[in-house]
Image (cartoon, helix red, strand yellow):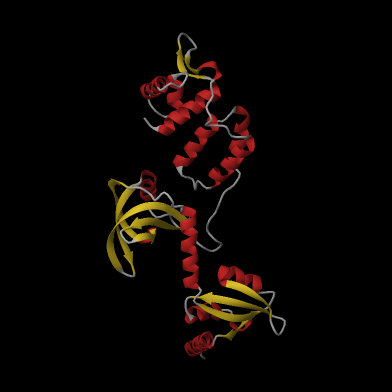
Amino acid sequence: MRADRLVATLLLMQTRGRVTAAELAAELEVSVATARRDLEALSAAGVPVYPQPGRGGGWQLVGGARTDLSGLTAPEARALFLLAGSSTGGEPEVKSALRKLVRALPQTFRADAQAAADAVVIDPARWGRHDRTRPGLVTLLQRAVVERQRVRMDYERSGRRTQRLVDPWGLIDKDAVWYLIAGTERGKRTFRVDRILDAELTGEIVDRPADFDLSTAWDEVVEQMEQRRAAVSATVLVSAELLPVLRDQQGRHCEVDGPGPDGRVQVRITAPTANMVARQLAGWGEDVEVLEPPSVRAELAALGIALAQRYSI
């Protein structure tokens, strides 16, 4: 018997007061026999759910009994459906779950909840970009994390393929790029899901460390990655008019130092190597000026010479 189905049963009975096995079966998309077994199991477990015989009978929470499962205020229900409705991505299972939740809410909340679920659409693709497709293995890995099952997977990095046995602790969706944080024989590791070539659940149940917090672990990963990506720093002058465009392009790798010596704005641009800084700035032409370091200026000069030779008339 699924715990989520029992929760839905209790919510429906709390909202409606009385339901028949047939009504419950239609709502939860199960057979009438299954619905009846669920109701009998709830009653046997001590929940005050009893059958009412005769025409118009059914099953009822006796004495006005209530659960704490739907103790949402109207603003809480609206906030929940704004978040859930906008992030479903059109997935049928989530849409179906939202419909069932709406029906389980008190009548006075339903209109606002349904309106909230339809109020926002999130389009994750930037202008001029294609939306990234979610890796097919995400669903299997989500199941592994929830069920605490060990995973055997084939992983490819830098053209090298290896087989790993990992304990999945959590998944992260960062700008449509998915990552898996897992325990390994060498400690905690982070894997890009799109580099996992194949994966299977082993059936072995594993424990996640009691002190593990997914948000904290991911913050640590982000900090380490940003430090690696900021190994080289260049001091750059740019006009105040173009500064917002440069900051939007470079993100957190563009920091404003303050006014420059000639009315322009002085900023710092970071990247893993001098060549990468130069390539990011080459397209700006004379709209930016790199003051230092000499390594970035030399890379820009080399790029300029190469372009002049390629396109000289």
**Within the image, what quadrant is residue 5 found in?**
top left
In the picture, the quarter occupied by the N terminus is: top left
Instruction: Give percent across and percent down for residue 150.
Output: 31, 50
Instruction: Give percent across and percent down for residue 311.
Output: 50, 87
**At x 59% / y 72%, what residue is drawn?**
254
**Within the image, what quadrant is residue 198 found in?**
bottom left
Instruction: Give percent across and percent down for residue 113.
Output: 59, 37
Could one spot residue 7 in this view of the protein?
yes
Could one spot residue 130 in this view of the protein?
no
**At x 56% / y 62%, what residue is drawn?**
127
Residue at the extreme front: 211
Instruction: Give the number of marks.
Output: 0
Left or right relative to 210: residue 87: right
**At x 32% / y 55%, what residue is drawn?**
166
Instruction: Give percent across and percent down for residue 188.
Output: 38, 59
**Within the image, what quadrant is residue 47 found in?**
top left
